[in-house]
Image (spheres, rainbow, N blue to C red):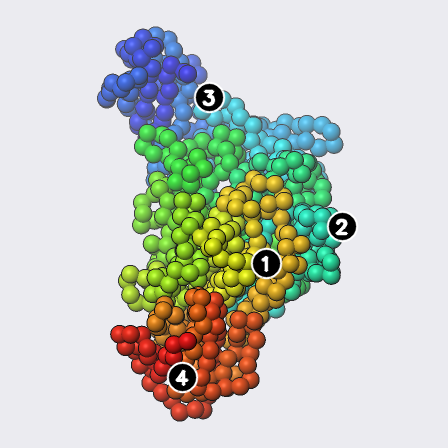
Amino acid sequence: MPAMHAYLDDFGKITIWMNKNFYGGRSDYFSLVEGSSSQDLVVVNAEEHDTKMKYVLTCPADGTFGKDYKIRESHGLMVPLQIRNIVSTDEFNRMFYYGGDDLGSIYHPTHTDFALWAPTAVSVTLHIHMNKKVDSYPMKRSDHGVWRMRVEGDLSHALYCYFVERNGCVVRSLDPYALSSNGNGQYSAVINEELLKKVPFVKPEGKVCGTDAILYEANVRDMTSSCLTGTKTNGKYVSLCEDHTQYDCFPTGLNYLAGLGVTHIQLMPVHDYCTVDEFHPEKNYNWGYDPMQYLSLEGSYSLNPDDPYSRMKEMRELVSTFHKKGMRVNLDVVFNHTYDVDSCCFNCVMPYYYYRYNEGGFLSNGSFCGNDFASDKPMARKYLLYVISKMMDLYDVDGFRFDLMGILDVETMNAIKEKGKKKKADFMLYGEGWDLPTMLDYKKKASIMNQNVMPEIAHFNDYFRDVVKGKTSDDQKYSKGYITGDTEHAFSFLSAITGNVMGDPLFKRFEQPDQTINNIETHDNSTSWDKMHACCNNEDRQTRKERQKMMILTTLISQGIPFLHAGCEFCGTKNDDSNSYNAPDRINQMDWERAVFYSDIIEYTKKCIALRKEYKQFRLHTTEEIMEHVKVNVSEGGIVFYDIFMKDEEHHIDAIRCIFNPSYNGREYDFEPDWKCIFDEYGQAHEEHGTHVEVPALSIRIFARIAGLPNFNGESPNSNGEHLWGVSHRKN
């Protein structure tokens, strides 16, 4: 451990820490050294700590950067002056914010321009690898701390890296603005974007966003990694482009996804991540929430990971293929942290800037992954906006899901939303808005508690998940939700199915229904089926199947944006592995044998999706509409009634009534007007109509009131719950 550290923490302020095992941590003076010149510094404060002495010194506040400064103490020890907390000051950002759009490597047939933002660097050297030789180019410092170099010649396919001298050492770094890289991210790559246009974009028809969207989470590798998928390749971008694949006459891969009827495929991370060997992906597995590069795609999904163009062309083809099938594509991005700070290009190029630190200089760890990305810094915000914009330009993606979005700040998220909507009117933006302990004022966090200042940005609704299914943590896996059998959650359930937008402050979480992502499971935690293996372990398979169907239908008829995780539609299991981020393929991959076995649930899910698409009543766009048209209440035995009173000339009805019965007993009701069943526990409609209806045990039945019948005024249930909006209850 070095005997002394010296940090430039502000303009005119240097902080020094000396170990007491070095002359007791005492020094008679300190000097600022630059080349052959030296200047004595003034000690304004000295503090004694357990093992160290802390000194605060004044220094010239001339704002000069890019020089190799050192600090020398009275015994002759000399250490580099590290540029630290000063990079977080407003003055630093005013001096060095760069608004240009030419960072990275900009290709031209006759030359390539390289630009790197590194204001604290002393020197930057560009190394270009091409035609089995390496050329070095000392870069020149320009305005706002940008280092530049123009290299003549056609550099398409050239590989490069930077050697950056800063804080007393020289480090090798990739280019944070590089569009691609070679295998395992060894080098950044110069990209001729014109070559990518050989894979043309295909525009999906119409406009689909907000509550009209139906999201389906999938993993590139998982969708086709099974040998039973029937694809020529497995686990690759191109594998998901293969059509008409099947297992035992059952559709797989792309063919399967296209048949579900969902509007959006949400792909788990496809940016370059760290813990899978791109040349030998079969050796290990990872979901991809360990990012190292944000613009370069993951090479393990490519047929040729060492070719920087291959992964890009294959991704363009994948998005275009989905668009041809009528599905849009959202990307899951992990901007809250990086896998490793020391080796990441952000820290190599610009130490202490792109990550949050506390006052003591320690990394903020609200992500619980060791570091938090400092999205609130001007150049960090600019970078995220560039990544989003470039991913849309390069791959024509339609939206983004932000992992641990609560780490990021409100201003950045709103700026990303505006940028995305300028490119696509139906752009979608949503994420995990958990309140996380990052070093950021709570009013600035992009969390659920601040959703009121982030319109049109949605959040995963853990309230919905916990109420419907039960809590997901391992220590609460035995707890039940409303659909899994605990009718004590009935009143909470009312709020969940109405998008948590109702006026009751106890239950209201969102301003508008397009801000809630309703789901019963995601890639995280246990699957719904595995959850029931714990909390409903006394029930037989058929009973749990009925509950699975109820959870799926609940998700698709509730107000808000429905979200399905791949496999939930065939009772997917991870063999009780609640955190399978690095589990083998056999745990995470699509199990086509299981899909065949539970094909009845898949067919039911398709009908649920079709139901939501057909009836606009389940996808109201505003809170005002919900408040005007929706009424909910709880009847005897915890039976939930969910009524939507809205004229529907297309279907000749003026109201829809959903009755939820998670109990073991069937229910019968006499309604005052005539109603017909439009969706039963098999997804079937009944032609007959009348005043007497039945709701079997463990089912949701949906009824419609025939238009043109005399109107009636809904009345509240009495204390016994025996009347509800003109409904009389008959005990079975």
- Report which residue position mark 4 lands on: 671
Residue lying at the far right in this picture: please name it.
232
- Report which residue position mark 2 lands on: 232
Q: Position of residue 710 (x, y in %)?
A: 40, 92
Q: In this view, does 636 lie above or below 271?
A: below
User: In this orientation, does residue 639 appear?
Assistant: yes
User: Mark number for residue 168?
Assistant: 3
> Which circle's residue, 4 or 2, is located before the other in the chain?
2
Kind of residue at disc 2: Lys
Q: In this view, does 201 lie above or below 160?
A: below
Number of numbered tags placed on the structure image: 4
- At 47% from the left and 50% from the top, the residue drawn is 534
Kind of residue at disc 3: Gly
Q: In this view, does 626 lie to the left or right of 563?
A: left
Q: Is residue 195 left or right of residue 688?
A: right
Kind of residue at disc 1: Phe
Q: How far apart are marks 3 and 1 (CA)?
A: 57 Å
Mark 2 nearby-residue class (10 Å; few <14, some 14–19, many ≥20): few
Q: Give the quadrant of residue 452.
A: bottom left
Question: Which of the pair 679/163 is nearer the observer?
Answer: 679
